[in-house]
Amino acid sequence: MNIILPLFVLLALAGLAVLAALVLIRNVLYVSPPNQVLIFSGASPRTTPEGRKVGYRIIKGGRTLRIPLLESVDSLDLSNMIIELQIKGAYSRGGIPLNVLGIANIKVPGEEPLIHNTIERFLGKSRAEIMEVARETLEGNLRGVLSSLTPEQVNMDKEAFSGRLTEEAEHDLSNLGLVLDTLKIQNVTDDVGYLDSIGRTRSAEVRRNAQIAESLAKAQTAEQKWRNTMEAELGKLDAQLQVAIADNQRRVSDAQTKRGAMIAEQQGEVQAMIAQTSGEIQMQDARIEQVRLQLEADVIQPAEAQCMQQEQLAKAGAARITQQGLATAQVLKNLAITYRATGTTGREVMLMQKLVPTMKQILGSMNDMRVDRLTVIGGGNAGGDASLANKLVSTSEQIKAATGIDVPKLIQERFGGAEPTPGMLPAPLPKR
């Protein structure tokens, strides 16, 4: 019994100690959910990354211990705040009052440095107060934007109106430490019926445009119909044209084929005639060669042989005559030497030897003979010298008649002396 009582006291004290510890922890340990920011004020000043000196620290989505007696804890809700915007009689550009109904979503920023503006302006204020400040700010921005836009611009392009309003409001809300998530314009009306007249005008324009579009569609349909009809007719004409072209090509091809056949036939006939003519030409060439060979054998070769024979005979005769002439010339030369050596006696003897037979012939043919030249060899006794002279004269005349060589003239030109004058007697030979 004495042991159990001290043990029970110890357990009670331990329980009290644990309970005191739990109460203490509960008072100094703070846990922040993700949609809430805890601000621990009273700590020593610190410098933020932006260079701002603050005397508090921020916990978002975590836990930390509060320094007892030195720090106080406040919280800011980060959840979304929906603000309805309703403005009546806001004048637009042109002096037309408009009624605008919109909705905005704002929240407290959970990141630095915007949260510092929020802490400075809204720490300790309720969400209703924060929403009121935000609504008044947005309404002021809305009235400012409306004053720069015409009713047509506001009514026709609400997206552009919302975008411009968002740009104007974000700057003011950032200075307040609030974030504008979305801003939508739901409705725009007026009390003077201006937008209705715009709508009616627009409706009239739409109806007019619809009628114009309908008329254009009908016209395009009719035009397309006639265009299709035209293309169909053109297609038919094109098909007929293609058929005609194909028919013409077929005819041209047939004509070309027939022409080729006729040309080939004519060429065949011409080739046959050429071949026949070539054969005849070859046959005539063979016949010409045969005739040429026959003529050469029958006429040319015998003629050439006869010509060569006559040539040889002529050469032989000429050689004989030449030799005879040379011999006669030698004889006459010797006779002349002898004649000169004998003087006048030899001349007379020779002349008398030649004169007697000549006179006989002259007398026998006196009736029909014309004497062109008469040479009288006179003086001396008839004998051997006279006979030699007569032979010399006779031989000289024969040589002259046969060869045309005048022997006495040749002798005289070679040995000198006067040529006897025709019809005159030579000078008497000197006496010994």
Image (tube, rainbow, N blue to C red):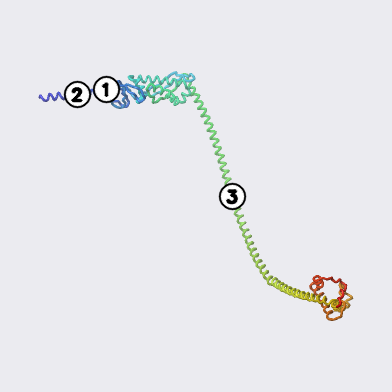
Residue at 56% across / 45% down in the picture? 239
* Quadrant hosting residue 80: top left
In the image, 400 versus 240, the foreground residue is: 400
In the image, 166 versus 156, the foreground residue is: 166
Q: Amino acid at mark 2?
A: Ala
Is the N terminus in the top left, top right, bottom left or bottom right quadrant? Answer: top left
| Residue 107 seen in this snapshot | no
Q: Where residue 103 appears, x then y in whole percent?
A: 40, 23
Give above or below for 76 relative to 339. above
**Residue beneath label 2, please?**
17
Q: Where residue 179 appears, x then y in whole percent?
A: 38, 24
Mark 3 burial class by Cα count in 10 Å: few <14, some 14-19, many 20+: few
In the image, 58 versus 51, the foreground residue is: 51
**Residue beneath label 3, please?**
249
Which residue is most to the right? 367
In the image, 361 versus 133, the foreground residue is: 361
**Badge 1 or badge 3: first in the primary sequence:** 1
Mark 2–mark 1 Cα distance, whole angstroms, equals 20 Å
Helix, strand or loop under label 1: loop
Q: Nearer the viewer, mark 2 or mark 3?
A: 2
Q: Horizontal placement of 248 versus 3: left or right?
A: right
Mark 1–mark 3 Cα distance, whole angstroms, equals 111 Å
Q: Horizontal placement of 205 versus 16: left or right?
A: right
Question: Is there CB contact under 8 Å for labels 2 and 1?
Answer: no
Helix, strand or loop under label 2: helix
Q: Amino acid at mark 3?
A: Gln
Mark 1 burial class by Cα count in 10 Å: few <14, some 14-19, many 20+: some
